[in-house]
Image: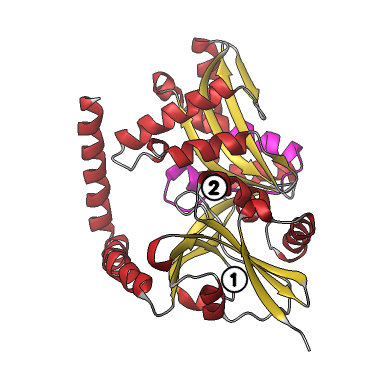
Amino acid sequence: MTVQRIDVIRPAELSPADLEVWGELRATTAPEANPFMSPEFCQAVGQVRQGARIAVVRQDGEPAGFFPFERGLCGRGRAIGLGVSDCQGAVLRPGTVVDTRELLRASSLSVWEFNHLESGQDLFLPFATGQFASPVIDLAGGYTGYEALLRAGSRTFLKATRAQERRLARQAGPLRFVFDERDPAVLRTLMAWKSAQYRRTGRRDRFAQDWINNLVRTLATTRAPSCSGLLSVLYADGRPVAAHFGLRSRTVLSCWFPAYDRDFATFSPGRVLYLRMIEAAAAAGIDMLDLGRGDAAYKDSLKTRELIVHEGAVLRAGAGAALHWLSHEPPRAVRGFVRERPQLKAAALRTLAMVGSIRDRRT
């Protein structure tokens, strides 16, 4: 008879055996080796978030599954790194049966919230309340194969971007691209650009939160096969004009924080950077770039297909579940109502832009 036990530990307390099993399970069962589901990402979050925990499912004393989460007041739980993590869920050995509410009980949670649950997470999919497209770029056929698809589907985009690249080189100086830049000063520059972009567009500035700042800096120095920080930079005459920081595994690059110098906005440096980055990723053996959930014209031009991610929450009777419902479900219903009506969505985006413009003038 199989004996199952659930131990809840801090990410730093994962044993070498736990880490080995986790890595093997992701390598053999995950459709895509997304670095946000790696133990290294969870350990990095554990360094900056006090409530980070891992529920380790053990069968006959051996690790059979891992459920990363963050625990807050009144048992209110959320996916680890919620707010910046682009892939969420549990890592389970095939055939392992876990009762969802028993998992929450063992984790001292009355609710567990997610907003980027990957497809195939059968344990949590019944609790999803919405699903969203996450565009991706397939590179299994190499960059040559991808560019052929891009020419067929977005020929104008490719031609215009290449023209902008030549203009940028003529007017700003010789271009140089670094796929894996290690200079922390350039990372700070990227974060400053991104903060300004958030404020300018009326969105919440993620880098105004210390834990996100510290998480990105920690991940920038993380070097593991299943999770490495990757800073890619486009220089013009030695000056950074566009940059991107993301996470990569052996086969997947999760795009995360792209930004550019607004002084060069007329040259579309962000698009130029992406084409260079895609080519370098293919050469480095990366099979897929995950562009992340969210609408953007450049994503529509670059993507080859879409993954589906889900949002929702698992609830178990308790004060935390009641508080979660009151604070999340009415606003979520309103957001869903707006998303499904293009005119309202366009008006909401215009309002965000107006707020960002006012905020920009005040700074």
**Which residue occupies the foreground of this view, 310 or 342?**
310
User: Residue 20 placed where, x, y %?
Assistant: 79, 57
In the displayed structure, 27 sits above or below 264; it is below
Disc 1: which residue: 121
Q: SS class of the residue under badge 1?
A: loop
24 in magenta:
no
Q: Is residue 163 visible?
A: no
- Quadrant (top left, top right, bottom left, bottom right) of the C terminus: top left
Q: Amino acid at mark 1?
A: Gln
Q: SS class of the residue under badge 2?
A: loop
Q: Which residues are magenta?
A: 274-299
Q: Residue at x 25, y 29 (%)?
A: 360
Tags 2 and 1 in contact by the CB under 8 Å rule?
Answer: no
Q: Nearer the viewer, mark 2 or mark 1?
A: 1
User: Residue 41 placed where, x, y %?
Assistant: 62, 49
Q: Amino acid at mark 2?
A: Leu
Q: Residue at x 43, y 44 (%)?
A: 297
Left or right side of 288 for 100? left
In the displayed structure, 229 sits above or below 299; it is above
For residue 277, which numbered disc appears in the image? none
Quadrant of the image occupied by residue 352: top left
User: Residue 206 placed where, x, y %?
Assistant: 40, 41
Disc 2: which residue: 291
Left or right side of 221 for 302? left
Cα–Cα gap, marks 2 and 1: 20 Å
